[in-house]
Image (cartoon, rainbow, N blue to C red):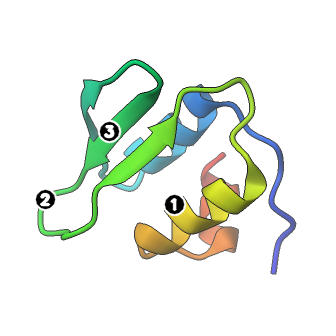
Amino acid sequence: MAKLPSASSRKVVKAFQSFGWEVVRRESSHIIMVKEGEMATLSVPDHRAVAKGTLRSLIRSAGLTVNEFVAAL
């Protein structure tokens, strides 16, 4: 398994967008993303560095592997 790098919310959002996820709204401290055909909604914290545990949870919710996500960064 690839080591999960530290990433800003902007990089995380761009990586998820490459897999078809779309930003539907920005709340005060989170970016909400959805993908057609998926039950999950991703809530990406709008921080300089997204915590690794939070990022791992988002990757799992999106149905991706860490390797796939790291390759998209």
Residue at the outermost bottom position: 1
- Residue 52 locus on image (x, y percent): 76, 55
Position above or below: 27 against 70: above
Give whichever of discs 1 and 2 has the lower sequence position: 2
Residue position marked by numbered label 1 in the rendering: 58
Residue position marked by numbered label 3 in the rendering: 32
Identify residue type, mark 1: Leu
- Residue 2 locus on image (x, y percent): 83, 72
Q: CA distance from mark 3 to mark 1?
A: 11 Å
Q: Residue at x 33, y 23 (%)?
A: 27
Position above or below: 3 against 10: below
Q: CA distance from mark 1 to mark 2?
A: 17 Å
Q: Residue at x 59, y 31 (%)?
A: 9
Q: CA distance from mark 3 to mark 2?
A: 14 Å
Judged from the image, the secondary structure of the residue bearing numbered disc 2 is loop
Residue position marked by numbered label 2 in the rendering: 36
Identify residue type, mark 2: Glu
For this rendering, which residue is in front, 30 or 4? 30
Count of numbered circles in the view: 3
Give whichever of discs 3 and 1 has the lower sequence position: 3
